[in-house]
Amino acid sequence: MTEHIAQSFPENFLWGGAIAANQAEGAWNEDGKGPAISDAFRGGIVGGTFDDTIDENKYYASHEAIDFYHRYKEDIALFAEMGMKCFRTSIAWSRIFPNGDDAEPNEKGLQFYDDLFDELLKHGIEPVITISHFELPLNLIRKYEGWKSRKLIGFYTKYAEVVFKRYKNKVKYWMNFNEINHFHTIPLAAGGIVVQDDEHKLPTIYQASHHVFVASALATKLCHEMIPGAMMGAMLSLSPIYPNTCNPDDVFDAYELRRRSLFYSDVLLRGYYPSYAKRIWKEHSIKVQMEPGDEQLLREHTADYLGFSYYRSTTHKAGMPILGNTGGIMGLDNPYLDKTPWGWPIDPKGFRYVCNEMYDRYQKPLFVVENGYGSHDEILEDGSIHDPERVDYLNKHLIQLHEAIEDGCEVLGYTWWGPIDIVSAGTGEMKKRYGFIYVDKNNDGSGTLERRKKNSFYWYQKIIESNGKVL
Ligand code: BGP
């Protein structure tokens, strides 16, 4: 390990880890929980298949996941041992409202998160909560075609109000929707948006997004009114988008793609639709239906901070499709970068780049709520697990994050994605492991679920203990 001396991170910097309910909890139909959209995907929400009839004879990764629902005490004790100051997870909407449109919330679901948050607080760990992380109650898809329907604004704000009321003394950091800009790339899984066909795709996505913006503004309003001092974040998936060459066509196209991916944060953090949206709508004959007062709500209730995930960068060439396809997501090969075993380019400098780009653009605090390295891990004969690549990824990214802070970016904290191995959102695999803690579970669902510390566990512990000085 190269010991590079960094100055320490800001005082009270929130070091932590992040997971999502559907990728960790399991117990998919226990204690009154209704099925969520994530329970109906097999093989991951990006590459997998969705069938809302859920065949119980088949294997669905989210149904047991790593059984965090029953083992959270053991897991939180390990997070505390690492020294975590905060922990990001989501509330599964369908534990609270099993059908999404129920008249009353499910008490057992509410109690679970009370217990979970108490356990975190007992260890001095601040909960950081995503209200909706790819977990829309399935019934809202079946009955209303998801966010396409304006009715969802009411269901969501009711849900948000219930959780604010219940957890107002326990949770200060909130986010409405996970990776909201993926509503464009994976509308069903990320956005709970049912798109009939290509012709209706863009109009449907923009209309549904408008409903989500109004719902976010209303929830932000409630959050501020009900929980003094609480902060509501917008949450984005961020990758810098590099032009493939200095050909102005490549440069402008990359810029255009960038802008479209920031459409969501532009609305949520600035409080109004950006000027470039008008051109997109005109070109695609899109008429977004708004009600009187909607735009005022957006203006008055903007997000307090930008939470984001950062894993990699993307390289773009003029003419590559710019909306909603995998070419747009993964981009071209960048010959200057190594890749993870899952083919994701490793780009620590890109991390500094996006932090600066976002802080320059919005001048609001940043919170890195996902960054991580998905890889294979093996238990050696002596029971140990060596994961030097994960440690290397972590170090290099944190060094760049520190640089970004020195550049002047205000960063509230950093939560490593999957501090414990969980189900991959993209592929539904267990073998794509991010954890500092290994979970004995395989892709086919076999395994004892036993937890075991990897080498990186001890290294992250040192990083937190020294507030980053060991880097
Ligand atoms: C983000 C999601 C997470 C998470 C992560 C890693 O897009 O917010 O839910 O899973 O990506 O992706 P994967 O699990 O596909 O490796």
Image (spheres, rainbow, N blue to C red):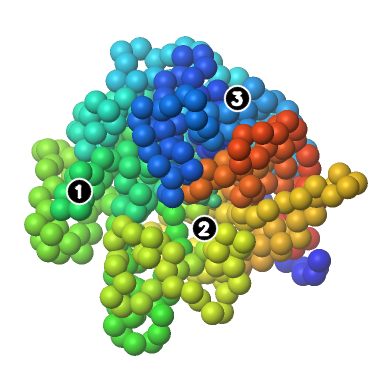
Task: Measuring from the top left, give residue 232's x and y in whole percent.
Answer: 42, 40
78 over 409 or under it: above or below? above
Task: Measuring from the top left, give residue 100's x and y in whole percent.
Answer: 33, 23
Task: Report the Cα–Cα distance between label 1 and label 2.
Answer: 31 Å
Q: Is residue 321 left or right of residue 55?
A: left
The residue where tag 2 is placed is 310
Foreground tag (1 vs 2): 1
Foreground tag (3 vs 1): 1
In terms of sequence position, does the residue under pointer 1 or pointer 2 come before the other? 1
Task: Measuring from the top left, give residue 66's x and y in whole percent.
Answer: 63, 33
Task: Report the Cα–Cα distance between label 3 and label 1.
Answer: 37 Å
Q: Can residue 26 be seen here?
A: yes
469 over 173 or under it: above or below? below
371 over 349 or under it: above or below? above
The residue where tag 3 is placed is 69
Q: Amino acid at mark 3?
A: Tyr
SS for callout 1: loop
In the image, 96 versus 145, the foreground residue is 145
